[in-house]
Structure formats: C-alpha cells, structure tokens
Image: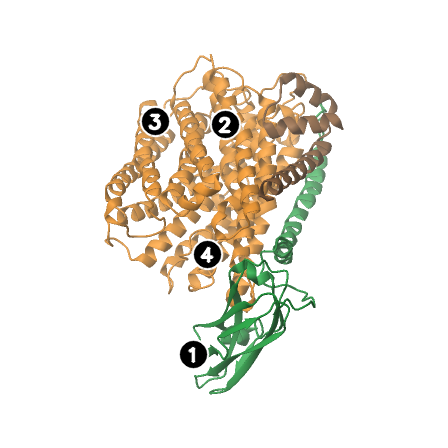
Amino acid sequence: MWDTFRAVFWAFLGIRSSQGYDEDRKKLKIHHVIIAGVVCALVFVVMLLMLVKFITAK
Amino acid sequence: MASATTHDHAHGHGHGHDHDHHGPGPWTRIFTTTNHKDIGSMYLWFSLLMFFVGGAMALLIRAELFQPGLQVVQPEVFNSLTTVHALVMIFGAVMPAFVGFANWLIPLQIGAADMAFPRMNNWSFWLMIPATILLMASFFVPGGAAASGWTLYPPLSTQGGIGVDMTIMAIHILGASSIMGSINIITTILNMRAPGMTLMRMPMFVWTWLITAYLIIAVMPVLAGCITMLLTDRHFGTSFFNAAGGGDPTMFMHIFWFFGHPEVYILILPAFGIMSQIIPAFARKPLFGYASMVYATASIAILSFIVWGHHMFTVGMPAAGQLFFMYATMLIAVPTGVKIFNWIATMWRGSISFETPMLFAIGFLCMFTLGGFSGLVLSIVPVDITLHNTYYVVAHFHYVLFPGAIWALMAGVYFWLPKWTGRMYNETLGKWHFWLSAISFNVTFFPQHFLGLAGMPRRIPDYALQFAEWNMISTIGAFALGFSQLLFVYNVFSCIRSGEKAKERQWDSADSLEWTHLPSPVPYHTFETPPDLRGTNAAH
Amino acid sequence: MSVTTDEFDIASPAEVRESNAVTLRKLLLIVPVMLVFCFSLVPLYQKICEVLGVTATRAIAQNSQVDTSRLVKLDFDATNRNLAWRFDPVDRHVEAHPGAIVTINYRVTNMTDRVTTGRATPSFGPSEAGLYFNKIECFCFSNQTLQPGETRDMPVTFFIDPKMPVAIEAIALSYTMFDITDATKKS
C-alpha cells in the first residue's frame, strides 16, 4: 500500500531510482498503481485548491 | 491468423510466401488488406500527403502575411485557412502518422504476428478518407469552410454555413477512427506480447503509445459530445452554448479544452517514444532511467486532465481558478523536464554519431525545450493576459509541434526506413534536409515571438506597419521550410527505388526486436510463432 | 496483467482471441462512459458556477429585512440582437433600498408584419452585483411570441440582497433580446 503510493509519488516527479524500480517490480500490482495514481491526482488537486484558497483569502 | 503454426509448416518462414497474400491485385489489396505493415504504410503515405496539403495552406497564410494589406486571399478565406490548416495538421497529418508508426512497429517490437483486430485496423484507416474529403470539400460549399479557428468556439461556429457541419462530421468520423485505432493498439499491447516480453521490458515507443491510446479513448468521446452539442445548437434549437436560450459559450471552451489539453499530449507522447528509441541507439548506451520514463509518461497523462484552464485564462474565471490552473500547469512541466534530462543523461559520455535520425532527435531536444519554455511563460496568468491571442502563442505551439511531433516523425522515418524497405536513404541528402529544416524553421517561427511580444494578434490577415519586417522574414523562412520538405519526399522515394542495401541491424546499438530478430526488409509476415524471450535480456 | 510477472507461457490463438474480445469489450465501455461524462459536464458546469458564485442567476430568493440605511442606484437598459422589435425599459432609473421589493417594466413592440419570437438574457454591471440581485418575476429566458404590431409590457420584480457589499452603489441591468423565431420553429 505504502509502497504503491511511494512509487506514484516518484512518478509524479518523473524520477525513479533503479533500486526503487526493482522493488516496485517485485511488490506492485498494476491495478493498485492505477488506483493510487488517480487517488494521488485527486490529492494533488485538493492540495493545489487549498494553496489557492490560502493565497486568495484576504 | 487462425493458426500461426500450421501456416509456418505449410509455407516455411520469412520471405517465402510474400506473394500469395497479396490478393488479386495492388488496387484491391489496398482496400482489403488487414496486414499491419500495409496499413501502417498506408497511414504514413496518407499523413505525408496531408502534411503537404496542410503545409500548402500554411504557405498561403504566410504569403498573405508577407506584406501588410490584403493581397492573396480574402479575410473569410484566410480565417478558413487557419482553421483547416490546424485541423488537417492535427487530425490528418500528425495523429495518422503516429498511428502508422504504431501499426508498423508495435507488433514487431512486442513479437506479435499482427494487430489484435486486423479488420478493424483496415476500417480505421479507410474511415479517414471520407472524413478528409468532407473537410476539404467544405472549402467549395456556399459559405466556405469553417472559419472559427480549429477550436470551433461558438458563437462563430454556431454561425457559418454547411461547411461548419461538414467539418463537424469530419471530426466525428476521424474521432471514431482514432478510437478504433486506439482500442486495437491497447489490445495488441496487453494481450499479444511474446512470452517473456513483460510490460516493463517493452520498448519505450510501445509504452508511450499504450498511454496515448488510453488518452485517446478517454477524450475523443468528450470531443464528440462537445461538437454534437454544437450541431444540435445549430440545427435542433437546443441552447447548450447559445446565450439567447440561456446557454453559455464559455462552457464550450471548458468542455473543448478538457479534450484539448490531453490532445496536446496525444500529439507529443508518441514522439517521446520515438526519441527514446533513437537517442540510445546513436549514443550507444541504454536509455537512462527507463522506469522513470515510464512512470513520468503515465503521470503526465493523468495530470494532463487538470490543466485545461490555462487555454482560457482570459475568458472570465475567478482568480482562484486562474491560480489553480497556473500552478498545475507549471508543475506538469516537472515530469516533462525530467524526461529531457533523461535523454541528455542517455547521451552523456556516450559514443555519439550524428546520422540523420540523431540530428533530428537532437534538434527535437533543443527546439522542443524552447517551446516548452515559452509555454511556461504563457502559463503565468498576468503574462498570458497580455500575450494571449498574439503571435507569441503561435510561436509557442509551433515550437512544440513542428520540431516536437514532426521532427520526431522525420527522425523515426529515417531511423526505420532501412528496416521497412531494406534500403538505405541518402545520408547526405538527409543531413541537408535536417539543416535546411532547422534553419528555416527558426527563421519562420523565432521572429513570431517578437511579433507576439509587440502585440500582433493571431488569425488576422492584415497587420499594422510596424510588424512588416519580421513578417516578411517569417514568410521567407516558411517558404524555405516548406520546400525543403520536398528533399524528404525525394529521399524517401529514391531510397525505396534505388537505395543501397541495408543491413539487418543497420544501427548497431538499436536493440528492439525488429532489429535483433528480423531481416531487412521485414518480411510480409513476421513472428507467426512468437519469439521466446523468457530468460533473455530483451531490451527496452 | 501484472507488472511483476516476469515470465508467462505462450497462449494458443484461441486463447488470445478470447482475451482480445474481453479487452475489446472493456475498452468499448470507456467510450459511452466518457460520452455521458461529457454531457454531464453541462449541469455540472452550472452547479460549479453557482457554488463558486460566478453566475448571474441564483436559484432561491430569500426574504429579508429592508435595509433603509442605504440607497442603491439602478439603471435599466435594453439591447436588440437581430430582431426588428422596439425593446425599451419603461422605467430607466430607479433607486431602491436593499431588501425592498421593486417592480419595473419593459415594453416591447413587434415592428414586423410576422409573428416573431424573442428571448432575453440579462447581464449585470458590475457582474458580481448579479449575485445579490434577486428576481421574483422576470421575462428573461422565456419565449416571448408577439403578433405583428403587438405591444406588451413585461414586468421585472426584484429585491436587492441586503448582504450586498456597500462598495456596490449602483447596478446596471441590461437585457439583450435575441430572435429565436427560427429555432422555435425547428424544435
């Protein structure tokens, strides 16, 4: 679970060490990765929205 | 494909049985063929033709802009030209060309005998022909072709004659064609890989197409729905976008760009894939950060759905919305930037040689990065408010699409021609083609940055006197750019007719299956028994 | 399909065809789902605009106290879009206390010799004033069909929300009348 999210986090940055990738290959299931990817995208959107709200608040 | 093994026993392997599948004659064959190589070639020829059709329209536009005032075309025709130039280049040239590459290469690179649904493959090609005819014929109907810009914004697109309806129908058909093509590609990749060709061992080109195909299936229906609403607004009295009936033209923009931004990545991700095949082959080093590349491509695809608002900062959006889309847009540049660094790291300390495909690849890296940077400039809301709808935007997207998508395609053609035809292209001519393109491209589009910063609006056939010099230079560059593409056509034809024999592994460091397992030219039927790659170190 | 499986066996052609058909069905499902999503963006868009407060129309008008401490200047205007009608406000300028219910009239005359249908849309200046301008009765967004030469008075009954920022001292409300005769004939 945690591993999946860690992999997706690195994916958003676009970097993955070969060591980390080897671990991914052993542990991750592709369905989990896709779900984690969508969840992370939603979290990313919410984070941006909060940041925007914070900035535009007077 | 019913039984690949029986086939093999009956005819032997390789070149032997080329002819018995060609059907009654070449003309019947092009209509009925289900062979992925035939269809791939047909896609590529078609897109080459459309590239020149769209290019001719671009030259008409530039000829009109050579001097201030109206010389060559009337303003209405000018508006139609900018509209149809974009539609032809996007839906007629770049997308079919990438589908052509996919048809040719994906089965070869994953060790499949053909695409998953060969008959549907034939269909998705032939659907494009009536669509293109509709699109081109719209120039000759009363009212002329759609003149609203390729984005078809209402109210411009709810006005206009039957030409607009023809354009909408053409886009519908082209959309159906690309959805069918994408379904074919995804199914092929997921189900027909050779034993041992795991997902994470697939060549980068296959990966980028897998992700692109998902994007296409996800957003083409959105475009279809969007232009259907346009059609019902035009003819059936609905008011989705018609302010008179309580509709909202701004909503069209939101729906359109919800499709439109992923579409931008549809046009560039396969180019990233081609780059990732070519650069390692000429740097003689494996691709740096293969896993990073796959991950980054996937995340770019996901994030491409949340940045559409940056195409419409000025239409009336709360400040919070502008900030959201601005931050999201800037952040999506991070995985894209990482890919650029990965390619540079691939070349780092490699023993690089500069054959034509590599020249185009390096040109891609430099020019695409420039276009990416001007994109970042435009993503800043206050800057965009001044620069939107100016030539700066035109310069930006031509920098990402011409040296991005088109040069990747050129590089790919030069790279795989020896494999496809069994003959080598003329290297000197190829180098001339590259350098002429590189110089004339920059002569054409770099001045457009200055024009945009000085405030010249896009999609206008006339302009104020102070823009005259740079427009003249830009037009000269455009004609040089257009005519130097003829070198490419000549080179391809002379390669097919009389090129030198190519080696099986023409590029000694290219390591995907078509180079390591198949002769040049590739026989008509390949991998009827899938190669067994289990335990081998099949490369990316 | 799993990323982790390194090795797998050769599938028979029948097996491949079978799994291809399954994948085809799954992928084809995405198409109608995204089409439905596209059309659901229409109500979703209205909803989001309402939530974000960037819309001129508010669904529920709440009754409230009259705020006699300030007067808001109201200007009414009318524009004709491709329609041969005379379309003017009867009351051009009004002053009103926030919370007070006011009725003004617009007058239309069909100057043509045909039966014509028009429909009006409102717009506010400043646009955020639209959030506080609560219409109880209005002719906007509904079809007005006029016989040749017919004249009609159309009332607008409204009150201004007392919660409107004091910075807004004046509101201009402008209606644009569109010709939708052709559109109504078709539908």
**Secondary element at image label 2:** loop
Q: Is residue B393 left or right of residue C71?
A: left
Q: Which residue is mark 4?
A: B167
Per the rendering, the mark at residue B522 is 2
Q: Which residue is mark 1?
A: C84
Give the residue type that dot 3 points to: Gly
The colour of chain C is green
- Where's residue C36, x and y in %? 65, 54
**Are there few (<14), some (14-19), or many (20+) residues within 10 Å of tag 1?**
some
Looking at the picture, tell me which residue is in the foreground, B185 or B78. B78
Residue drawn where x is 35% and y is 38% of the image: B449
Distance of mark 4 from mark 3, alpha carbons? 36 Å
Q: Earlier in the sequence, mark 4 or mark 3?
A: 4
Q: Quadrant of the C terminus of chain A?
A: top right
Work out whether disc 1 and disc 3 sit on a shared chain.
no
Tell me the CA gap for discs 1 and 3. Answer: 65 Å
User: How far, Cα to Cα, is label 2 from label 3?
Assistant: 22 Å
Give the Cα distance between marks 4 and 1. Answer: 32 Å
Q: Nearer the viewer, mark 4 or mark 3?
A: 4
- Amino acid type of disc 1? Ala
Residue contact at pointers 2 and 4, CB within 8 angstroms: no
Q: Colour of chain A?
A: brown
Q: Amino acid at mark 4?
A: Thr
Whether labels 4 and 3 share one chain: yes
